[in-house]
Image (tube, grey):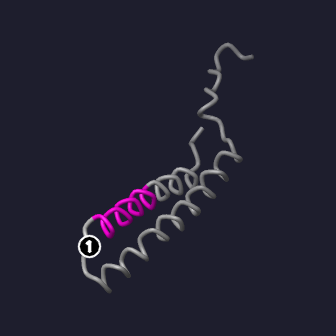
Amino acid sequence: PDPGKPIPCPSERSHPMKRILLLVAGVAGALVGLGFIMPAVAWWRQSGFDGLRVALPLLLGAVLVLGATTALAKGATRSQP
């Protein structure tokens, strides 16, 4: 190797498989999170707020959607060399 040129760190190199997995995990996580949120909202509208029966799926779904959005953003952006 050229002594004047730094060797790139493995985390700085492009990994297409990692990007694809992050995108797929992001889409799947968003769909699963919405799968928790939608029934909880329907239950809330139909029966009123019923404590943990509504709050727990809403919170879990929101966390899943937030994590999925983060994975999608990380998978969609390319690292700059």
Residue linked to disc 1: 50
Quadrant of the snapshot with the C terminus: top right
Q: Is residue 67 left or right of residue 50?
A: right
**Three-letter amino acid code of the residue under disc 1:** Asp
Residue located at (40% from left, 57% from top): 63
68 left or right of 28 in image: left
Q: Note whether 60 is above or below 8 in the view shown.
A: below
Give the magenta-colored segment's residue range. 52-66
Name which residue lies at 62% across and 21% down.
6
Quick one: 68 or 81, which is closer to the camera? Answer: 68
Residue 42 highlighted magenta (yes or no)? no
**In the rendered image, the vertical position of residue 22 relative to residue 36, given as above or below:** above
Q: Where is residue 18 in the image (x, y as percent from the top left)?
A: 66, 45
Q: In which quarter of the image is residue 2?
A: top right
Q: Nearer the viewer, residue 9 or 22?
A: 22
Corner quadrant of residue 80 = top right
Q: Residues within 10 Å of mark 1 (few under 14, many from 20)?
A: few
The residue depicted at 38 percent of the width and 74 percent of the height is 40
Q: Quick check: is 53 in the magenta stretch?
A: yes
Examine the residues drawn in magenta and state their main secondary structure: helix
Vertical arrangement, residue 18 with respect to residue 42, above or below? above
Q: Residue at x 50, y 57 (%)?
A: 68
Instruction: Tell me where residue 31 appears, x and y as whole percent.
Output: 54, 68
Task: Please state which of residues 50 and 30 is positioned toward the viewer in this rendering.
Answer: 50
Give percent across and percent down for residue 7. 65, 22
Looking at the rendered image, the quarter that the N terminus falls into is: top right
37 or 47, which is in the foreground?
Answer: 47
